[in-house]
Amino acid sequence: MKRCWMPMLLLAAFGCGEDAPQIIPRHAVTFTAESDPGVPLAGVVVSANGQALGQSDATGLIGAVLEGPSGTMMQIAYECPEGHQQPEQPKSLVLTTFQALDPESGPRALEMNLECPPLERWAALVVRTGQPDLPILIEDEEVARTDGSGVAHHIFRGAPNSRYRVTISTEGKPNLQPQNPRALVTLGARSETFVIEEEIRERQVRRRRRTRRRASAMRGRMSIMRIIRIN
């Protein structure tokens, strides 16, 4: 019969004449899903090395525990919800144990951000002309008209880096200057407001000076006529 000379404490851990069981380290990981920096996004589905971990909640957070020796490389794949840009490839996460400054708090969780930028951005357009009832066109389509103070507002959306031609239409009003001014707006990586200021004025029509003889003949009549501005 084989004798076992190990102390009882070691016997409990290893058994008699057997190899010690390998303990696989466990690493807490917190994933933060965002549509923009600081904007949480729910519904992002996450997996590690092909194993599903769950999906982000309303706060954009996903908590998981990954097993593996320190230094193990994990491939983190995630799927963004509809209307958001899908990642081109998985992200790499190296399992590492970080000890917190407070020894009693235990190891600190690993953290990873998951970005899901929107496929479209909102843009607010403000046009100031100084003239009322002027159509505002985006790519030749009327989207708004200036109010009594000569200001128009419009909200639209489009893909980032898209360019749009904005036209202040003066069709049918040849006395306004400049005629049909245009501007280009380019949507950026975030939603923003564009302000277009174009002072549009009525062109003053100068009357020709009449000859002295003609003015003398009309002097009596001019005293009872109104001067009418041509619009």
Image (cartoon, rainbow, N blue to C red):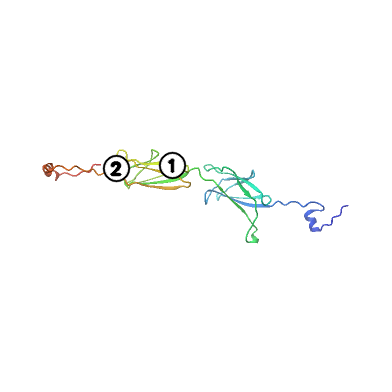
Q: Mark 2 falls on what kind of element? A: strand
Q: What element carries label 1?
A: strand
Image-based side of 96 in relation to 187, left or right: right
Could you classify mark 1 by the number of other residues whose Cα lies within 10 Å: few (under 14), some (14-19), or many (20 or more)? some
Q: Residue 175: give x, y in percent of width and height.
A: 27, 41
Query: Which label was assigned to residue 176?
Result: 2
Residue 79 locus on image (x, y percent): 57, 43
What residue is shown at x 78% (from left), y 54% (from top)? 14
Residue 150 visible (yes or no): no
Q: How many numbered tags mark residues here?
A: 2
Kind of residue indicated by mark 1: Arg
Residue, far right: 1
Name which residue type carries label 2. Leu
Judged left or right of residue 88, residue 229 is left
Which picture quadrant has residue 187? top left
User: Who's the residue at 42% across and 48% down the image?
Assistant: 193
Quote the CA–CA distance across marks 1 and 2: 27 Å
In the image, residue 162 sits, relative to residue 17, either above or below, namely: above
Quadrant showing the C terminus:
top left
Nearer to me, 4 or 54: 4
Q: Is residue 26 left or right of residue 147?
A: right
x and y, in percent, of residue 124 in the image: 42, 46
Local packing at callout 2 (Cα closer than 10 Å; few below 14, some 14-19, many 20+) is: some
Q: Specify whether 192 is left or right of 64.
A: left
Residue at the spot 79% in from the left edge and 57% down from the top edge: 10
Residue pictured at 29% horizontal, 42% vertical: 176
Find disc 1 in the rendering and name its residue. 163
Which of marks 2 and 1 precedes in the sequence?
1
Give x and y (percent) for residue 2: 87, 52
